[in-house]
Image (cartoon, grey):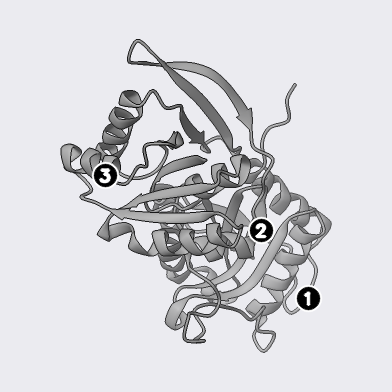
Amino acid sequence: MTTMIALVGGQPQPNYLPVLHTMPEHVVLIYTQGSLRPYNNLKIAIEQKGISVEGIQTDPYDIAAIASAIEQGLAADTQFVFNLTGGTKPMSLAAAQVAAQRNAPVIYLQSEKKESILYHYNWQHQRLNFQRQERLTQHLSLTEMLHLQVGPKKDANGETVWTEHGPDLHFDGGYFELAIARTLKDNNYETMGGFKGPNGKPEIDVIVRDQNQIGIIEAKTGKGSTNFDGIKQLSLSARFLGATFTRTFLVLDRLPDDHQKIICEALNIQIISLPNYQPRTETLSAEDQQTLLTAVDQALRPTPDK
């Protein structure tokens, strides 16, 4: 039996994608009290793929305690592979120590360059030796990503955890959100509008996905374009969904003011101005469509190989 050891942190994707790619028979998730929610979400998602899951809770920073907890949870007659991508740095060090003792292969998922690339290593003379890298072809839907980060739409008691209600066309801003989402969807992005998290927070106007990269969009029109509500909402939403895989966009129907520019630059929020938008219309002008797509493409889509 092949068992994957994975370290759970705030981002579930680096644990889940390698499982989908390699399909081990068993997964051992090493988690802490601080990563209990991602652990629970991962356990549900992995078990739905027919893979058994075991959880081991440990200390986030005590290397000796972490290594001991991992060792105690491992069977003697099993082939192991260690995914060192998630968790705290001490968890990675402890897991690497156990992997070296068992001469077990190690993998690491790199996702910072708009792609999911899995690196494979083995041990030679107690040192990690690079074997190969491969680009993962497994792409999660927005719903799958939200299940991992937020949880299923309904909890075990049938209570709603999160919803997608679409743009509210009772307000001018709802038409702007619809026009943005349509432009992206027409260009092969998956979109979701009107997301509300647990207890209604956070609220996200548009979520957009390409491969395993997602962006969150706050769309502001009229007087709302000049205040800081959209920036606050984006900052909250990015922390909620996890910054590693998430890009943030403030989309305005006019040019931003200098204060917005300064704050967005500090928070790594990209401003997109669509000044040709006509109120209460469901489409963007050709020029604004190109502006939107150029910005989102550059942020989310890998650069084509030359």
Q: Is residue 19 left or right of residue 304?
A: left
In primary-sequence order, the first of circles 1 and 3 is 3
In primary-sequence order, the first of circles 3 and 2 is 3
User: Spatial distance from mark 3 to mark 2, Cα to Cα?
Assistant: 36 Å
- Return the residue nearer the eye: 108 or 298: 108
Q: Residue at x 55, y 42 (%)?
A: 18
* Residue type marked 1: Thr
Residue 281 is labelled as: 1
Q: Is residue 69 visible?
A: yes
Q: Residue at x 68, y 59 (%)?
A: 274
Quarter where residue 46 is shown:
bottom right
To which residue does mark 2 refer? 141
Asked if residue 38 is positioned above or below residue 122 in the image, the reply reads below
Q: Residue at x 52, y 52 (%)?
A: 246
Q: Is residue 16 left or right of residue 138?
A: left
Q: State the SS at label 3.
A: helix
The residue mark sitting in front, 3 or 2, is 3
* Residue type marked 3: Gln
In primary-sequence order, the first of circles 1 and 2 is 2
| Residue 26 screen position, x and y as percent | 50, 48
The residue mark sitting in front, 1 or 3, is 3
- Return the residue nearer the eye: 8 or 201: 8
To which residue does mark 3 refer? 72
Residue 35 is labelled as: none
Q: Residues within 10 Å of mark 1 (few under 14, many from 20)?
A: few
Q: Is residue 144 left or right of residue 236?
A: right
Asked if residue 78 is positioned above or below residue 128 in the image, the reply reads below
The residue mark sitting in front, 1 or 2, is 2
Q: State the SS at label 2.
A: loop
Q: Residues within 10 Å of mark 3 (few under 14, many from 20)?
A: few
Asked if residue 221 is positioned above or below residue 290 in the image, the reply reads below
